Amino acid sequence: MDRLAKRYLRSRKIPGTTCSGCGLGQVHKKVLLAIEQLGLGTKDIVWGTGIGCAGRQIFNTWKGDNFAGTHGRVYALATGLRLALPEERKIILTAGDGDAFGIGLLHLLHCARRNLDVTVVVADNFGCQSTGGQYGCTTPRGYVTDSSPYGVREPGWLENGLDILDMLRDAGATFLARHSSFEGQSAVDSCAQAIRHKGFSLVHFIYPCVTHFGAVSLQSGDKARIFRWFEGLFRPEAGNSGDPRFRSGVYHDAGSSRPEFASSLKEWTRTVRREAAGRD
């Protein structure tokens, strides 16, 4: 057990529940490294999780306060907690691509619209892998899965000019980043920026599923080959030039250009109370 696990995680949850070669542990470690980099402890953070691979692996591993929501509902729970908790407490939410961009998208958009002070870490393995490898809203078109034996025929959120981060930016998100699970310090730095950010922040991680996506969609059990395929999805100079690969790093940083929801609502409540007291 490494120093991060000893400091931050419950020993009975180590090792985790992921398949051998899964990239989810890499994503989890990036977030823990960012927490350590910021000098935060278990009492500083409340950690929420969703369902699926990401939820099962990360739920109740955090030594501090944590909670889980049913599919897509972790954001609604976090909204209530953000209003109830002191402003200095951080809220981190870990969700899979289904919890974030599928069934949970509407709740996620409302968090962005309100500019709620939470950090969402999306662990995206290109499908519904925990239930057997069905295709999802980020599965690349044409790839075979258990539920698309002739290839996915519908466009996903990450192709043909669509990018889910554009929708989140337009909805009001004030910090967005994207990385692969293979990246090092740059991914840790983005996570640290997101946690430190006052307002809605989201870091989208794309990571390899070797059990389903690798074996079925890529037709390979060779973990090195699967890893190389996922690494090839990223290139530093990728952008809006028609290159289908992703640009890693900070995607959008609006700073403090929008008021944070919980702080502004609490201030408004105090104003209403003062005005009411003055009329008595």
Image (cartoon, rainbow, N blue to C red):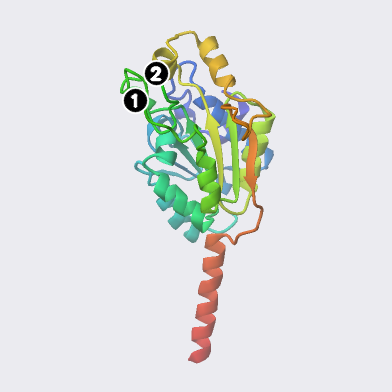
Nearest the eye: 84 or 210: 210
36 and 186: which one is in front? 186
Measuring 39% from the left and 14% from the top, which residue is drawn there?
Answer: 216
Residue 54 percent across, percent down from the top left = 44, 32
The residue tagged 1 is 134
Q: Residue at x 68, y 38 (%)?
A: 37
Most foreground residue, 163 or 206: 163
**Do callouts 2 and 1 mark residues in contact (Cβ within 8 Å)?**
no
Q: Which residue does the image show at 51% across and 11% down from the upper left?
A: 223
Q: Quadrant of the N terminus?
A: top right
The x and y percentages for residue 253 are 65, 47
Q: In this picture, is 172 found above or below 274?
A: above
Amino acid identity at mark 1: Gln
Q: Residues within 10 Å of mark 2 (few under 14, many from 20)?
A: many
Q: Is residue 94 left or right of residue 148?
A: right
Is residue 28 shown above or below 105?
above
Residue projecting furthest to the bottom: 280
Mark 2 residue element? helix
Indicate the secondary structure of the residue bearing disc 1: loop
Crowding around mark 1 (Cα neighbors within 10 Å: few <14, some 14 to 19, many 20+) is many
Q: Can residue 231 be seen?
A: yes
Residue 96 lies in quadrant: top left
The quadrant where residue 258 appears: bottom right
Amino acid type at mark 2: His
Q: Earlier in the sequence, mark 2 or mark 1?
A: 1
Q: CA distance from mark 2 to mark 1?
A: 9 Å
> Residue 107: x, y in percent?
41, 50
Q: Is residue 40 visible?
A: no
Q: Which residue bears the numbered disc 2?
A: 212
Q: Is residue 278 above or below residue 188?
A: below
